């Protein structure tokens, strides 16, 4: 059996100190299976973004451990960041750069060799339907197009693990459906593991497995059928 893509053990994270402190995660222990789409479900303020950022090695733990693709996210955060694709809320785009310039920037950050970029860029632009818009500023794109560009930037290196933080907020139903088609194509064709956070229960039904997070704690985890 393949090792889990993510293992969190008794994870704690608090922001602030004293009376103003906020407990973002409280004793969270989960395993995210490899090669599937796992949904991280919960309302705003449940701790979804904090969990995602810990899994990417972008935040320090207050307690517990996080293992991402077999890498200790506390001891080797740079190695984790180099191994995963992460699309934050609001897509993480530079709106004063063009579509192509955003792709180039993320390729530079991910250390993608220049010689191999054109083929991958062509694949991503065809997959997302953005090929006619490579010179357009990201800030001039529609919400759905920004979503797809953000996803393309997270996929510049075809990561083993893709982390998507509420990727469908503020976009139209067609763009939501297209995102799910792209995500499942990556799982099927590239064997990618995906953790996707959402507050929408209808999106949970599209996942192979769901983790329910509420008030900083895990209420449960269960497999589903998962469908496009």
Image (cartoon, rainbow, N blue to C red):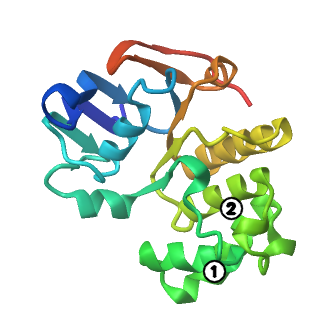
Q: Nearer the viewer, residue 225 or 66?
A: 66
Residue at 12% from the left image edge and 29% from the top image edge: 18
Determine the secondary structure under disc 2: helix
> Is disc 2 surrounded by few (<14), some (14 to 19) or many (20+) residues within 10 Å?
many
Which quarter of the figure is the C terminus placed in?
A: top right
Could you say where residue 121 lies in the image, as x and y percent from the top left? Answer: 67, 74
What residue did someone put label 2 on? 149
Could you say where residue 91 lies in the image, as x and y percent from the top left? Answer: 59, 54
Residue at 22% from the left image edge and 30% from the top image edge: 20
Residue at 39% from the left image edge and 41% from the top image edge: 52
Please, is residue 143 above or below residue 221 in the view?
A: below
Which quarter of the figure is the N terminus placed in?
A: top left
Residue lying farthest front? 19
Could you say where residue 160 lies in the image, as x and y percent from the top left? Answer: 45, 53
Q: Quadrant of residue 152?
A: bottom right
What residue did someone put label 1 on? 101
Q: Nearer the viewer, residue 186 or 110?
A: 110
Can the viewer see residue 5 in this picture?
no
Q: Is residue 112 left or right of residue 103?
A: left
Please, is residue 106 above or below residue 76 in the view?
A: below
Q: Is residue 107 left or right of residue 96?
A: left
Determine the secondary structure under disc 1: helix
Please, is residue 69 above or below residue 224 in the view?
A: below
> Is disc 1 surrounded by few (<14), some (14 to 19) or many (20+) residues within 10 Å?
some
Cα–Cα span, label 2 and label 1: 11 Å
Q: Nearer the viewer, residue 83 or 87?
A: 87
């Amino acid at each position: 059996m393949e090792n889990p893509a993510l293992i969190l053990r008794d994870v704690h994270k608090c922001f602030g100190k004293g009376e103003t402190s906020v407990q973002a995660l409280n004793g969270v222990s989960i395993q995210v299976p490899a090669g599937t789409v796992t949904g991280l479900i919960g309302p705003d303020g449940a701790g979804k973004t904090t969990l995602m950022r810990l899994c990417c090695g972008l935040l320090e733990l207050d307690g517990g451990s996080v293992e991402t693709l077999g890498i200790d996210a506390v001891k080797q955060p740079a190695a984790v960041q180099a191994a995963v694709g992460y699309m934050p809320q609001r897509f993480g785009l530079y709106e004063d750069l063009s579509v192509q310039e955003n792709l180039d920037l993320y390729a530079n950050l991910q250390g993608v060799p220049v010689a191999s970029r054109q083929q991958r860029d062509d694949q991503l632009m065809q997959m997302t339907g953005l090929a006619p818009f490579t010179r357009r500023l990201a800030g001039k794109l529609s919400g759905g197009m920004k979503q797809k560009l953000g996803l393309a930037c997270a996929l510049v290196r075809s990561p083993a693990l893709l982390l998507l933080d509420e990727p469908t907020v503020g976009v139209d139903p067609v763009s939501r459906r297209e995102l799910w088609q792209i995500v499942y194509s990556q799982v099927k064709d590239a064997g990618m593991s995906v953790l996707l956070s959402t507050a929408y229960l209808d999106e949970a039904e599209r996942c192979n497995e769901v983790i329910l997070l509420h008030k900083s704690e895990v209420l449960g985890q269960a497999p589903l059928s998962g469908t496009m």
